[in-house]
Image (cartoon, helix red, strand yellow):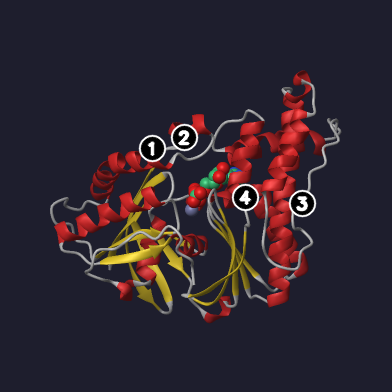
Amino acid sequence: MTILGIETSCDDTGIAIIEGAEQEGELRFRILAHNVSSQASLHAPYGGIYPSLAKREHEKNLPLVLSQALKEAKLSSVSPKIDAISVTVGPGLSPCLWSGVNFANNLAAQWSLPLIPANHIEGHILVSLLREEEDFFILPRDASLFPMLSLIISGGHTQLVLAKAFGAYEIIGETRDDAAGECFDKTARILGLSYPGGPAIAQQAELWRAKHTAQIQKSKFEIKLPRPMEHTKDYDFSFSGLKTAVLYDYQSRPEEERKSSEYVQEMAYNIQEAIADVLVKKTMQAARTLGVASVVLGGGVAANTRIKAKLSSTLSQEMSETKFFASKPSLSGDNGLIPAIAGLAHASQKTSAPLEANPNLRVG
Ligand code: KG4
Ligand code: ZN
């Protein structure tokens, strides 16, 4: 079947068209079109996402991204050969979700097509499991993946999701305040780095690490950041204290020192290490206690090579039998494949009734 996926849960307007089917227990599909319009530069001056601005941009971009996608897939814009429209209904920012859901409802009425509601977190999990073979993408569905533990980290979410089977999810831990990506974004702003802060911090951190590893540079500022909730027995996270510690350290330094590239690089390195330490520690604690068969890393922050490498190496050292899956960096951020794949996996949930957005939707 051919599915058109629409994603607008945050600040990316994504549309993908995929064609696939279940084959020998796996979902096999081809990507016919995959287009994302990013609003990052628009939100940069605010250091975070401005929901009403994001909604207006989604409404402006959706028809443009759709026409690009139909063209790429060589489909008619009057009555395209599509079997269903899958749209992200939650979780996410309410005005943003509604712009995608309203657009999907109108398209479905215009083209007389059924709709499939997609959960954004499940979509991130499924995208992270994909394997590429020639021009096909394959979503494994075998029972040996379970129990499966997913760490989904983005600008809006930090969740540990346990799955006993596809569709049988339970959130076993999540952030009590800021999300991991939000912590990257907010601390980057303190340091005067660009938005989105994650890639900016990662880049500065790598500059420092390269010099440090080559023993060209020693730690100069003796920065000590906390690892919030590292030792608690639950699987929850907290990142707002880390952000405050960065702010206090920054404010305690003379202007000349805190504006120096050496300080920014060393602080960026320490921020990335603190976030990576907490994420890896909590994920390993859950993986061990629950005896999972696979660990999945997804969401925009999964593009961070340090977090991915640290989780992967700790897992192979301590639980070598456990499989590790991480989304391709090009697919870790928000995009139309997220709802398209969730839609293909839940094709049986097709409905002819208009959908509603649910900003607080929980997976499971
Ligand atoms: O999943 P996503 O595209 O959108 C949300 O659902 O939030 O994630 C965006 C987040 C931003 O906070 C951004 O700073 C972060 O992902 N991010 C990164 C990296 N690339 C993007 N964080 C750390 N390292 C990266 N390389
Ligand atoms: Zn996301």
> Could you tell whether 53 is left or right of 355 in the image?
right
Instruction: Tell me if residue 249 can be seen.
Output: yes
Q: Which residue is mark 1?
A: 53
Residue at 35% x, 68% y is: 344
- Which quadrant of the figure contains the N terminus? bottom left
User: Horizontal and vertical percent for residue 141?
Assistant: 48, 75
Element class at badge 2: helix
C-alpha separation, residue under disc 3 versus residue under disc 1: 34 Å
Sooner in the amino-acid sequence: mark 1 or mark 4: 1
Q: Which residue is mark 3?
A: 227
Seen in the picture, residue 360 relative to 227 is either above or below; the reply is below
Decide which of 302, 71 is in the foreground and name it. Answer: 302
**In the figure, residue 322 lies in which quadrant?**
bottom right
Check contact, mark 1 vs mark 4: CB within 8 A: no
- Residue, far left: 78
> Could you tell whether 250 is left or right of 172 in the image?
right
Residue depth check, mark 2 versus mark 1: number of the one nearer the observer:
1
Element class at badge 3: loop
Q: Is mark 4 within 8 Å of ligand 1?
A: yes
Element class at badge 1: helix
Check contact, mark 2 vs mark 1: CB within 8 A: yes
Q: Amino acid at mark 2?
A: His
Sooner in the amino-acid sequence: mark 4 or mark 3: 4
Sooner in the amino-acid sequence: mark 2 or mark 1: 2
C-alpha separation, residue under disc 4 versus residue under disc 3: 12 Å
Q: Is mark 3 within 8 Å of ligand 1?
A: no
Q: Amino acid at mark 4?
A: Ala
Q: Which residue is mark 4?
A: 180
**In the figure, residue 252 lies in which quadrant?**
top right
Q: Which residue is mark 2?
A: 43
